[in-house]
Image: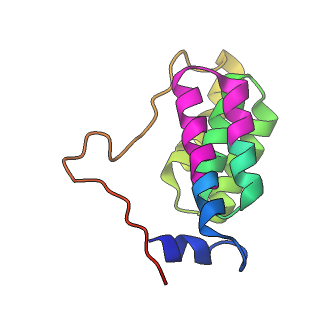
Amino acid sequence: MVEESLKLREPDFTLDQLIEQEDLFQEGLKLMQQGEWEEAVQAFQASIAMGDCLPQPWGNLGICLLMQERYDEAEAALRRALAIDPKYAIAKNNLALLPKFRRTGPPKMVVINEPFRSSKLKQSITFLTE
């Protein structure tokens, strides 16, 4: 999984950089859960700056911007998520809801999807050496 993830990035992107990028992404999620929208924006932007190859940071960035009523920026972020992965359903759905939020304001609550949180699968990280 690590090898596949590294292949998506620049050729000299290191495992340490991958870990740092994932830490930034996770920090952004934590800040979203706390309603710290601007701080979450900064975390997602930092993650994206390290390697712009995944739709999830852009989708989450879009939500954070939407919650701050920065609708044009939110739309651009959601569109970028879909440019990376046209099948990314969460970004599609949020983009479809954006006109409503422009009229009514942001939603009162945001649910963060964490597919492994309720999973009974054992989760672990294994470091591979060459």
Q: Residue at x 52, y 61 (%)?
A: 87
Q: Main secondary structure of the magenta part?
A: helix
**Residue pushed farthest front?**
129
Query: Is 25 above or below relative to 128?
Result: above
Image location of residue 124, percent across then percent down: 32, 56
- In the image shown, does 125 or 85 lie closer to the viewer? 125
Q: Residue at x 70, y 28 (%)?
A: 39
Residue 29 covered by magenta stretch = yes
Instruction: Determine which quarter of the picture holds residue 65.
Output: top right
Q: Residue at x 68, y 62 (%)?
A: 83
Is 31 left, or right, of 119 in this rendering?
A: right
Is 57 left, or right, of 73 in this rendering?
A: left
Is 89 left, or right, of 122 in this rendering?
A: right
Image location of residue 7, percent across then percent down: 60, 78
Residue 88 covered by magenta stretch = no
Q: Say how the picture is coloured.
A: rainbow
The residue segment tinted magenta is: 21-43
Image location of residue 89, percent across then percent down: 49, 52
Number of numbered discs visible in the structure rendering: 0
Q: Quadrant of the N terminus?
A: bottom left
- In the image shown, does 25 or 86 lie closer to the viewer? 25
**Residue pushed farthest left?**
120
Instruction: Determine which quarter of the picture holds residue 84.
Output: bottom right
Q: Residue at x 64, y 57 (%)?
A: 82
